[in-house]
Image (tube, rainbow, N blue to C red):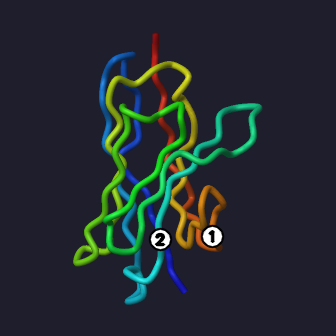
Amino acid sequence: QVQLVESGGGLVQAGGSLRLSCAASGRTFSSFAMGWFRQAPGKEREFVARISRSGAITSYADSVKGRFTISRDNAKTTVYLQMNNLKPEDTAVYYCNGGVVGQDPGDYWGRGTQVTVSS
């Protein structure tokens, strides 16, 4: 069992940056590929980024490629999402996920953190 807790969301102007963190409990953190998903009002939840168990391989949705960076620290059982050059369309609740396969979520979800980008 893995419990995930996100932090770092907030309100930022377009062009600004935020760094999201996801702290995981449990000793099995390094055995999971981790990812971030987001859900905007009135829209379905969508894939944002994924990182492999070791952190060596990452992948991104086309909409965030070149602006967002996912990373992880297995010693701290934490995964991060650095978001730069934010756009109003990035406004959403961002969710951490454990066990990501491709762009499909795994079984473990955090409760989410709100990111709001003003124009």
| Residue where numbered disc 1 is placed | 106
Distance between mark 2 and mark 1 Cα atoms: 9 Å
Q: Residue at horizontal 36%, vertical 32%?
A: 67
Q: Amino acid at mark 2?
A: Ala
| Residue where numbered disc 2 is placed | 33
Q: Camera-side residue: 18 or 53? A: 53
State which quarter of the image contains the N terminus.
bottom right
Q: Amino acid at mark 1?
A: Gly
Q: Neighbour class for label 1 at 10 Å: few (<14), some, many (≥20)?
A: some
Q: Is residue 117 above or below residue 96?
A: above
The percent position of residue 109, horizontal first and vertical second, equals 59, 66
Q: Residue at horizontal 57%, vertical 66%?
A: 100
Q: Camera-side residue: 6 or 105? A: 105
In the rendered image, is residue 20 in sight?
A: no
Residue 85, by quadrant, is top left
In the rendered image, is residue 19 in sight?
A: yes
The percent position of residue 25, horizontal first and vertical second, equals 40, 80
> What residue occupies the far top of the structure in this picture?
119
Q: Camera-side residue: 25 or 102? A: 102
The percent position of residue 47, horizontal first and vertical second, equals 60, 48
> What residue occupies the far left of the structure in this picture?
75
> For the residue labelled by badge 2, is the local secondary structure a helix, a strand or a loop?
loop
The percent position of residue 112, horizontal first and vertical second, equals 54, 52
